[in-house]
């Protein structure tokens, strides 16, 4: 059965009333869901950073072990070459073995220098690592607190919100698709979520711009759907709003 314009307007305003109640419940939660999400991102980012630093520290420790092994091998080679020096038969062999000893000595110096550099990097990265761990503990504590706060608020309002959401779905079922699409678009574009508003003090209660007397008269007649010329919201008269709210 085709709905009258008045019935369509009442259905839209009833849906708006339900959505406004849901919006108020969600406003109680405020920025908490976003704060929780941001803290979760912070925690994840810190965990990734800490793991990266830990891997770098492990690599540096491995590099030090490698360099110490190189030093040990070079020292062993020097001892071997020094023994061979006692057995040389000519200057050419002596110079060649002396050169090898010199090379091994230079390798030891390079490795010792690298070990010092790695040690400095480990000290620096360890400080960063420990700070990141402390930051992570702080972020986790903040996250736990925010989650607990959000959980408390959600548990207090969840039942009511679910009931209102069910009501909204039923109300939507009674509105033609074209109007529902327009309504949802208006709600999405409005900061306060108001798509259907009343006339208050001769003005649109959505944007507070004045509505001409003739247009107000047309709205009260409920013969066509009229929108605010300034904000585009659907307008209903105060009497209709009262009828819906007291029904």
Image (tube, helix red, strand yellow):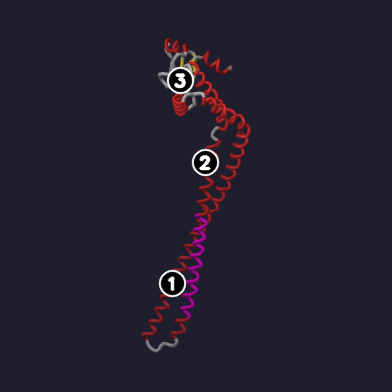
The residue positioned 50% from the left and 71% from the top of the image is 69
> Residue under circle 3?
234
Q: Residue furthest bottom?
A: 89
Q: Is residue 105 above or below residue 140?
A: below
> Residue under circle 2?
38
Viewer-side residue, 116 vs 229: 229
Q: Main secondary structure of the magenta part?
A: helix
| Mark 3 neighbour class, 10 Å CA radius: few under 14, some 14 to 19, many 20 or more | many
Q: Is residue 47 visible?
A: yes
| Mark 2 neighbour class, 10 Å CA radius: few under 14, some 14 to 19, many 20 or more | few
Q: Could you tell me which secondary element the residue under label 3 belongs to?
A: strand
State the CA–CA distance, disc 3 to disc 1. 84 Å
The residue positioned 51% from the left and 51% from the top of the image is 48
The residue positioned 58% from the left and 45% from the top of the image is 140
Closer to the observer: label 2 or label 1? 2
Viewer-side residue, 120 vs 2: 2
State the CA–CA distance, disc 2 to disc 1. 51 Å
Q: Is residue 45 above or below residue 221?
A: below
Residues drawn in magenta: 52-79
Q: Give the number of marks.
A: 3
Closer to the observer: label 3 or label 1? 3
Q: Residue furthest front?
A: 1
């Amino acid at each position: 059965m085709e709905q009258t314009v008045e019935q369509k307007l009442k259905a839209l305003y009833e849906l708006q009333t339900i959505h406004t109640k849901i919006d108020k419940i969600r406003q109680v939660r405020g920025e908490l869901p976003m704060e929780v999400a941001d803290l979760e991102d912070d925690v994840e980012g810190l965990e990734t950073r800490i793991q990266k630093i830990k891997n770098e520290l492990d690599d540096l420790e491995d590099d030090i072990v490698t360099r110490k092994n190189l030093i040990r091998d070079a020292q062993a080679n020097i001892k071997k070459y020094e023994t061979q020096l006692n057995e040389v038969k000519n200057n050419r062999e002596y110079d060649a073995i002396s050169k090898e000893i010199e090379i091994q000595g230079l390798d030891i110096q390079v490795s010792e220098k690298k070990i010092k550099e790695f040690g400095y990097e480990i000290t620096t990265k360890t400080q960063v690592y420990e700070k990141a761990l402390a930051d992570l503990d702080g972020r986790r504590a903040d996250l736990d607190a925010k989650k607990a706060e959000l959980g408390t608020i959600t548990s207090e309002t969840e039942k009511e919100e679910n009931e209102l959401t069910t009501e909204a779905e039923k109300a939507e079922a009674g509105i033609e698709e074209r109007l529902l699409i327009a309504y949802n678009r208006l709600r999405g574009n409005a900061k306060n979520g108001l798509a259907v508003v009343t006339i208050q003090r001769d003005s649109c209660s959505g944007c507070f711009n004045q509505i001409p007397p003739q247009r107000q008269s047309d709205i009260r007649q409920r013969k066509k759907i009229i929108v605010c010329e300034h904000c585009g919201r659907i307008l209903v008269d105060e009497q209709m709003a009262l009828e819906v709210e007291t029904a």
